[in-house]
Amino acid sequence: MIRKLAGCIREYKRASILSPLIVMLEVVLECILPFMTAELVNEIQGNCEMRVLLKYACLLVIMAALSLTCGALAGHFCATAACGFAKNLRKDLFYNVQRFSFGNIDKFSTSSLVTRLTTDVANVQMSYMMLVRTAFRAPFMMIFSFIMAFYMGGKMAWVFVVVMPILAFGLLMIAKKAMPIFRKVFRKYDTLNNSVQENIQGMRVVKAFVREEQEIKKFGAASEEVAGDFTRAEKLLALNHPLMQFCLNIVMLVVIFFGSQLVISSNSTALTVGQLSALLTYGMQILMSLMMLSMIFVMLTMSAESARRIVEVLEEKSTILNPENPCFEVEDGSIEFKKVSFKYSEKAERYALQDIDLKIESGQTIGIIGGTGSSKTTLIQLISRLYDVSEGAVWVGGKDVREYDLDSLRNQVAVVLQKNVLFAGTIKENLRWGDLHATDEELVEACKLACAHDFIMQFPDGYDTHIDQGGTNVSGGQKQRLCIARALLKKPKILILDDSTSAVDTHTDAVIRKAFREVIPGTTKLIIAQRISSVEEADRIVVMNGGRIDDIGTHQELLSRNEIYQEVYTSQTKGGEENE
């Protein structure tokens, strides 16, 4: 895990090394300052001249300035290293998620990925910041302070050695109790983010069903759980400060009591006032260093779970990879399913698709119809290798899809989903997802083919009209037509419409299908639909049932022999007659 995370440091190695080196210099200077102060106190006791006082004053000012400069530089390099590390971490996470297949995406929830990219990265960033600065400062400060304490105070310094194990044990017990709580709380963040995501995406549904109060209660419960866990952990960590203060006060009392006695009884020969003041300062530094170490331990504990979750995503390999010597050219739009069976995971008990044999010639129009859950969408997702078959093979253009370069294959297979997504930006920018270099004339041609041009021109800004995130400022039918135009701009050899005209009226649906027949006759068209009217003119219609092909034929053939098709046709035509 550490090796994987360390790979994200990259160009920030210099800053990551300079920060602890400068911190070490800062610590040395801070440990010399009490020694110099003690010498100054001793000189004052000896009735020194003003010249000596000025010399010590200048030295102290110079050393304090150097210490301040080192602290500022260490902070600068530490911030650069930590922020750069977090930037690379987010970048690597996002890039790896972009490479995921649908199978990988199914493994992680959207809310969990968002938490890992935000909260978890922030925790790891904070830990890294402490590692490159505080994690070096605290132990070095403790070691140097111990050395100087024994040098200045002799046997008196043993009091620090006695109290340190007591304080260390107390801090360790507090951190040990807090560790399991921090491990548990980040999993609850996923639930919290999931609640937020669902509500934002489904705001219209929430309001339509007047579910605001219930959703507020659901979010409140998730928020309360996170707050409750953090409160328990923070209550435990809050004991750190009083415990340290107790030990610090005890040590100070012991040092001052016995040190003062020693100064007085020996007439400052065994221990001077300056040495006693330095001893107190070093004692403070030792105990503060131990406190910092405990906080580092707690932070590392808290971020360990975040680091594990991040590495889990970084190490996730796409289940769909390019072959060693891929084919970059798709000859035509022919498709063949050869004894294909598919299930979403190896652990799944049943197949989503089973024993699929289907041959489609290039340029044909194929309708696919079937009830909910008959795996129509699953069937077409195998064509562009969004999933890989479990058994059998899918051939496109005379080759197994697993032989193609993924980008080359997917550029020749355009899919328009029922739940289409438009992104924030202008209509032109959304359309050019299909072809980044498409001219304005090509955009207009594709939109006319998809029956989108007329409504676009009704907007004041035409093709420069801004689309809100998710396409919320256009209707469902308009969104579908824009997505069809976007797919057509790819100039694909295979065009798949997954119930993507469900939100348009039957007349517009017919106009779009007619335009497809006349303008792109060489493109293979697969139309998944609930309406018989959307597929009745297809060359062949595939009837799906329970993940299998129930029948294949023309509209008339299926109407004469297939019970499922007859039932759907009858229910739709009867409904039409009743409406008339």
Image: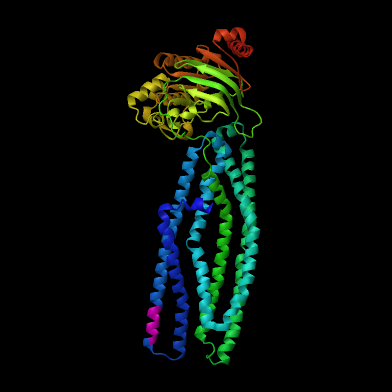
Residue pictured at 33% horizontal, 24% vertical: 441
Nearer to us in this view, 494 or 439: 494
Q: Position of residue 465 (x, y in %)?
A: 39, 30
Q: Position of residue 62 (x, y in %)?
A: 38, 75
The dominant secondary structure in magenta is helix
Which quadrant holds residue 389? top right
Residue pictured at 48% horizontal, 58% vertical: 129
Q: Is residue 203 above or below residue 536?
A: below
Q: Position of residue 45 (x, y in %)?
A: 47, 89
Nearer to us in this view, 197 or 335: 335
Nearer to us in this view, 311 or 187: 311
The way the protein has been coloured in the rendering is rainbow
* Residue 443 in the figure: left or right of residue 416: left
Q: Is residue 58 magenta?
A: yes
Q: Position of residue 172 (x, y in %)?
A: 63, 64
Nearer to us in this view, 564 or 388: 388
Is residue 88 visible in this depiction of the protein? yes
Q: Residue furthest front?
A: 325
* Residue 172 in the figure: left or right of residue 462: right
Is residue 530 visible in this depiction of the protein? no
Q: Is residue 83 above or below residue 362?
A: below
Question: In which quadrant of the rendered image does the C terminus lie?
Answer: top right
Q: Is residue 150 above or below residue 337?
A: below
Q: Is residue 339 magenta?
A: no
* Residue 528 in the figure: left or right of residue 493: right
| Magenta stretch, residue numbers | 52-59
